Amino acid sequence: MKELLELLLARLGIIPEVKTVRLFNNQLHKLTANETLAYPAVLLEVGNVVFEGFNGGTEIQYGTCLIKVHVVHNSLAQGHELAVYALKQTVHQYLHRFSGDMFNPLMRTEEMLDIDHDSLYDYQITYTTRFAEETQPLPDTTGTFLFDYQAGLTVENPA
């Protein structure tokens, strides 16, 4: 997941018109006069992640996740209302079928305009992708010890 997010942030960071690229943590509802973003901004939000079983005895587990891309624009002046639509199309061109060593090409699944902001357009594009994540178990895990204890086995403390 970390590789996926790092590559997406880097990819979005090369779009000339975009001034801010960050992970989303509800910044748009928390902005104050002293806290603002440089606009246009692109914010990445990770949605639900569903994991499958391990792959053939390896420590690789596959997951499918939703990535919501918030394309945020503050061009509210009359005659500039469509700027967010032009920018969202540019963002999509950069992400269309974008992939990496550990994740499949992104597939756009949904778009919507969030109008719950007084002075911003928040156009949201949702993508789905399947990715692989390798996790090595810790040595001497407590799970084995707990199973042995629950089964009534005598286990010596390795410490």
Image (cartoon, rainbow, N blue to C red):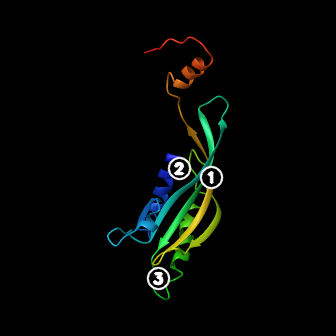
Q: Can residue 124 be seen by looking at this rendering? A: yes
Q: Is residue 67 above or below residue 150?
A: below
User: Disc 3 residue type?
Assistant: Leu
Q: CA distance from mark 3 to mark 2?
A: 33 Å
Q: Residue 114 at what x, y percent from top left?
A: 56, 72
Q: Can residue 104 be seen by looking at this rendering? A: no
Q: Is residue 46 above or below residue 61?
A: below
Looking at the image, residue 25 sits to the left or right of residue 103; the answer is: left
Q: Which mark is residue 76?
A: 3
The residue lying at 53 percent from left, 31 percent from top is 136
User: How many numbered circles does the render carry?
Assistant: 3
Sequence-wise, the earlier of marks 1 and 2 is 2
The residue lying at 59 percent from left, 48 percent from top is 103
Q: 10 Å neighbourhood of mark 2: few (<14), some, or many (≥20)?
A: some
User: Disc 1 residue type?
Assistant: Thr
Q: Which mark is residue 22?
A: none
- Closer to the camera: disc 3 or disc 1? 3
Q: Quick one: SS at disc 2?
A: helix
Of residues 154 and 108, the one nearer the viewer is: 154
Sequence-wise, the earlier of marks 3 and 2 is 2
Q: CA distance from mark 1 to mark 2?
A: 10 Å
* Residue ranking furthest to the bottom: 78
Q: Residue 80 at what x, y percent from top left?
A: 49, 84
The residue that disc 1 covers is 129
Q: Residue 10 at what x, y percent from top left?
A: 46, 56
Q: Quick one: SS at disc 1?
A: strand
User: Are the residues at dot 3 and dot 2 in contact (C-beta closer than 8 Å)?
Assistant: no
The residue lying at 56 percent from left, 60 percent from top is 68
Sequence-wise, the earlier of marks 3 and 1 is 3
The residue that disc 2 covers is 4
User: Are the residues at dot 1 and dot 2 in contact (C-beta closer than 8 Å)?
Assistant: yes
